Amino acid sequence: MTISLPVYRRVLLKLSGEALLGGSEFGISGEVLARLADEIGELINAGVGVALVVGGGNIFRGVGLAGRGMDRVTGDQMGMLATVINALALQDALEHAGLTARVMSALRINEVCEDYIRRRAVRHLEKGRVVVLAAGTGNPFFTTDSAASLRAVEVGAEILLKATKVDGIYSADPEREDSAQRYTHLSHDEVIDNRLQVMDTTAMVMCRDNDMPIRVFNIQRGDGLKKIIYGADDIGTLVDGRARETNE
């Protein structure tokens, strides 16, 4: 009998704050948290190390207020704190699902979570704990996409999984243009050169320079996360160092 094994042993999952909204316009959905915890639990039970980087757009977006006059550094710091709130909510949901989780923050908030220390994060992963990485890089002007790329490289992830609300990278916004084409495979350079705004350029360059593959997929669709871990290549869009092959 053939037993299917995960093709990845350690992954970094990037979640936007909006992914936690569910059907709401603001805040955190308990139903979404529970579903994510169950899906991540399946990976942990299969022996896959899971690190998470979470955004804060469901609570606060510093860039938006900076555009209306707020100091950009202040706005970004507020956004970092929003990611900590989301990270703590994820930790709670993971623990309710029977998992062991640790929140590690790039900002020093010792009363509520651990400081991010790379070696400690790797040790948590080795012990089967889910590591939830908050506060981005700890610096203003850097997105959580950049943080996800940096942390994926630092903790030795084999792939960066970017969870979105659409099923991959498109040539245009599929919600606005019916003719938008979904790509199944792109190189990092093709994403950068064609300005396919799935991640900011800093994040994409970091992945390119460190040979970090990225798979962009719809987190809201069934067991897509599990299928990716077990090697499904028909979900979302794969971005790696190879030139484009076939697209839909």
Image (cartoon, helix red, strand yellow):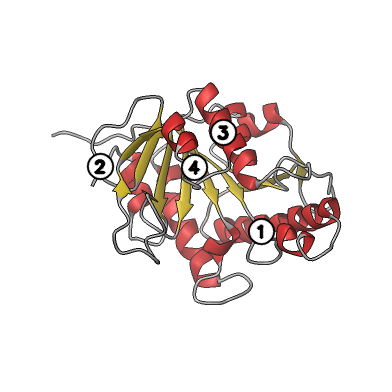
- What residue would you read off at disc 2? 247
Q: CA distance from mark 2 to mark 1?
A: 32 Å
- What residue would you read off at disc 4? 195
Q: Nearer the viewer, mark 3 or mark 4?
A: 4
**Which amino acid is tagged 4?**
Arg
**Which of 49 and 137 lies nearest the eye of the viewer?**
137
In this picture, residue 168 sits left or right of residue 160 = left
Question: In this rendering, is residue 181 above or below 221?
Answer: above
In this picture, residue 121 sits left or right of residue 50 = right
Q: Residue at x 75, y 52 (%)?
A: 80
Q: CA distance from mark 3 to mark 4?
A: 22 Å
**Which amino acid is tagged 2?**
Asn
Q: Secondary structure at mark 3?
A: helix
**Which amino acid is tagged 1?**
Gly
- Sequence-first tag of 1 and 3: 1
- Sequence-first tag of 3 and 2: 3
Q: Residue at x 62, y 30 (%)?
A: 122
Q: Quadrant of residue 213?
A: top left
Q: Residue at x 76, y 49 (%)?
A: 113
Question: In this rendering, is residue 151 above or below 167?
Answer: above
Q: Are marks 2 and 1 in contact (CB under 8 Å)?
A: no
**Which amino acid is tagged 3?**
Ala
Q: Which mark is residue 56?
A: 1
